[in-house]
Image (tube, helix red, strand yellow):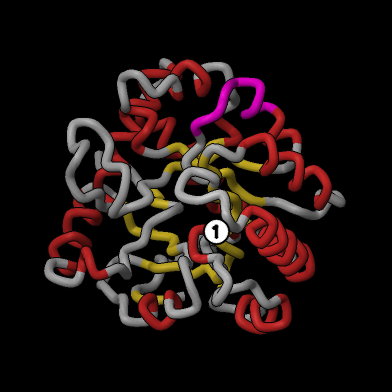
Amino acid sequence: MTLQLIDTHCHLYLDEFSGDLKEVCGRALQKGVTRILLPAISSVSLEQMNRLSHPGICFYKMAGIHPCEISEKIQADEEQLYKTAARDSIIAIGETGLDYYWSRDWIDDQKRSLKIHCAVAKALDKPIVLHNRESTSDLLDLIEEEQDGSLKGVWHCFTGTPEEGKRAIGLGLALGIGGVLTFKNSGVANAVRELPLESMVLETDAPYLAPVPKRGKRNEPSFVAYTAERLAEVMDLPVEEIAEITSRNAEELFGIQVKGNREEGTGNR
C-alpha cells in the first residue's frame, strides 16, 4: 500500500529543480506525496511558485522573508507582508526566524522581521513557519513574548533537545521532522523519542538536507518517505501510522484537509 505523505517544507521552485521537475514530481507521486508546501525565501519566491504545476500534486504557498535574506537593503515590511499573505492562496507565513550561523551582523533586524511575521500571522490567523540555526534560546524567547494564545506554527527542521522540543510545543508549535533525523550523530532521534508524535509533521527542506541513504545529494519530495521510515523506527510504530498521524497534524495546522470525497486538485493553491 502506498503511503499518503505531505511534504510540509519544500523549495521545489528553486533553480535546482528546473531541469527535471517533471521527473521529481513523478517520483513524489510514486511515494504517495500528493501535497507539497512551499515556504518563501524572498519577495520573488511567489512568482517562482506560480510556475509550478503537476497533475496529481497540490502545491500550497507561503509568504515571508528568510532570516538569511535580511540585510541593510532587505527588511521586512509589515504592511506589504500583510497585503501579500492575506490572499486566500497563502496558507502560512514564512519562512522566517533567526539564523546566527551564517552571520551575526543582522540579529536585531532578524528579530524585528520575526516580530513582524508573528504580527501578520496572528492578524490573519495563519501558522508561522520558523527557521532556526544556532538561535534556539532567542527564538523561543521571542515566540514566548509574541504568544497571546493565537500564534501557531512549526519549528522547521527541528534539531533541539527534548526540553527545547517540549517548550516549543508548549508555545503552540509543531515540530518539523526532516532528513537530519536520519543522520547518525545528530541526536535528533534521541530527542524525538521523548516527544509526542501528535506534535510532529514531516518535511524535506528540498533541495537541502537529504536524508540517509541520499545524504549529500539533492533532496526532493519523494525522500520524505525515508524520514517517515526512520521516524517509525524511532517511535516503534508502523510507518503507516506515522504517515497517517503526521499528515493529519499537517492538515489541521495548515488547514489543508480534503473535504468529503473530493480529491485534492492539481497545481497551485
| The one of 99 and 148 positioned closer to us in this rendering | 99
The picture places residue 90, in percent across and down from the top left corner, at 56, 73
Question: Which residue lies at the image location 51% right of the left edge and 36% below the top edge?
Answer: 158
Query: Is residue 124 part of the magenta span, yes or no?
Result: no
Question: Which residue lies at the image location 32% right of the left edge and 81% below the top edge?
Answer: 51
- Examine the rendered structure and indicate whether residue 222 appears above or below residue 266: above
> What's the residue type where badge 1 is placed?
Pro
Question: Which residue lies at the image location 32% right of the left edge and 53% below the top edge?
Answer: 206
Specify whether 110 is left or right of 187.
Answer: right
- Examine the rendered structure and indicate whether residue 223 appears above or below residue 166: below
Q: Quadrant of the N terminus?
A: top left
- Examine the rendered structure and indicate whether residue 74 appears above or below residue 217: below
- Secondary structure under the numbered disc 1 in the rendered image: helix
Question: Which residue lies at the image location 71% right of the left edge and 30% below the top edge?
Answer: 167
Q: Which residues are magenta?
A: 159-166
The picture places residue 16, in percent across and down from the top left corner, at 22, 64
| The one of 175 and 118 positioned closer to us in this rendering | 118
- According to the picture, the residue beneath numbered tag 1 turns out to be 67
The picture places residue 112, in percent across and down from the top left corner, at 72, 62
Instruction: Judge whether residue 252 can be spotted in this image.
Output: no
